């Protein structure tokens, strides 16, 4: 079983107080025993998770002396263009019978100043049995997907692949609007209702 905990966007090495640490939606950023949840975060139980792409920033809490307030700041970073082999995070925008259109938001751990168009073709979703796949059973609009650039594609899109256990959906919301939790490589569970939804899921890193 896969358990959705964090998405390792860069190696944190426990230094979450460093403003250079970048996170993605759904990534675990701290515990309420230490931090006060600020902008760009949400509480789930005793844990704090990011709700947007950005950099972690901490400051002394005014409401809770002795605690640090943790926020995720959406800040534009360095300009970079995806290259073949780059690991990118993209958002699914529109689904078609043979492919999913996406927008690329980050490349090789660097935020892009503007999104690039991407495409995940049916044959590039997984290594085997792609003829049996239905695009809507792998992705849904709004899903955040970790993928690899396999071709510069045509003039309209970069071609992306999720054919790897560490590639696929890393953050998604259910049809009921609640965050989904990964329970298998092809299934996620709504954190609010317990309903199951199909996805091509990325295996969470053990880091």
Image (cartoon, rainbow, N blue to C red):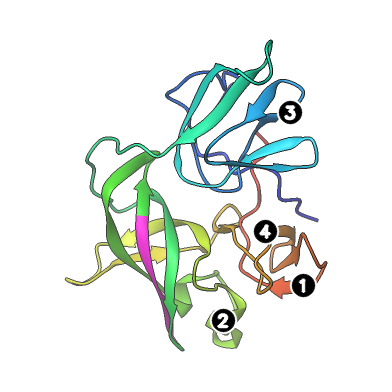
User: For residue 179, which numbered disc appears in the image?
Assistant: 4
Residue 28: quarter of image: top right
| Label 2, label 3: how far apart the Cα atoms are | 36 Å
Q: Which residue is mark 2?
A: 136
Q: State the residue lying farthest toward the front.
A: 63
Q: Comparing marks 3 and 4, which lies closer to the viewer?
A: 3
Residue in the picture at 55% in, 69% down: 126
Q: Are marks 2 and 3 in contact (CB under 8 Å)?
A: no
| Label 3, label 1: how far apart the Cα atoms are | 29 Å
Q: Comparing marks 3 and 1, which lies closer to the viewer?
A: 3
- Does label 2 or label 3 sit earlier along the sequence? 3
Q: Residues within 10 Å of mark 1 (few under 14, many from 20)?
A: some
Magenta extent: 98-104
| Label 2, label 1: how far apart the Cα atoms are | 14 Å
Q: Residues within 10 Å of mark 3 (few under 14, many from 20)?
A: some
Label 2, secondary structure: give it: helix
Q: Residues within 10 Å of mark 4 (few under 14, many from 20)?
A: some
In the rendered image, is residue 177 in sight? yes
- Does label 1 or label 4 sit earlier along the sequence? 4
Question: Image quadrant for the C terminus?
Answer: top right
Question: Image quadrant for the N terminus?
Answer: bottom right
179 on left or right of 183:
left
| Label 4, label 2: how far apart the Cα atoms are | 18 Å
Label 1, secondary structure: give it: strand
Q: Are marks 3 and 1 in contact (CB under 8 Å)?
A: no
50 on left or right of 194:
left
Dominant secondary structure, magenta = strand
| Label 1, label 4: how far apart the Cα atoms are | 12 Å
Label 3, secondary structure: give it: loop
Foreground residue among 91 and 163: 91
Q: Which residue is mark 1?
A: 196
User: For residue 108, which numbered disc appears in the image?
Assistant: none
């Amino acid at each position: 079983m896969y358990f959705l905990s964090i998405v390792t966007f860069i190696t944190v090495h426990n230094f979450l107080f460093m403003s250079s640490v970048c996170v993605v939606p759904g990534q675990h950023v701290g515990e309420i025993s230490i931090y006060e949840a600020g902008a760009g975060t949400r509480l789930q139980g005793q844990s704090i998770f990011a709700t947007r792409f950005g950099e972690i920033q901490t400051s002394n809490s005014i409401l809770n002396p002795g605690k640090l307030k943790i926020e995720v700041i959406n800040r534009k970073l360095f300009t970079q263009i995806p290259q073949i082999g780059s690991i990118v995070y993209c958002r699914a925008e529109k689904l078609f019978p043979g492919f999913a259109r996406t927008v690329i938001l980050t490349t090789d751990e660097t935020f892009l100043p503007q999104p690039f168009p991407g495409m995940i073709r049916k044959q590039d979703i997984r290594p085997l049995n792609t003829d049996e796949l239905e695009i809507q059973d792998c992705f849904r609009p709004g899903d955040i997907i970790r993928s690899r650039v396999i071709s510069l594609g045509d003039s309209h899109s970069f071609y992306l692949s999720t054919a790897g256990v560490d590639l696929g959906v890393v953050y998604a919301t259910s049809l009921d609007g609640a965050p989904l939790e990964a329970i298998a490589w092809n299934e996620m569970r709504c954190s609010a209702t317990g309903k199951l939804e199909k996805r091509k899921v990325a295996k969470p890193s053990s880091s």
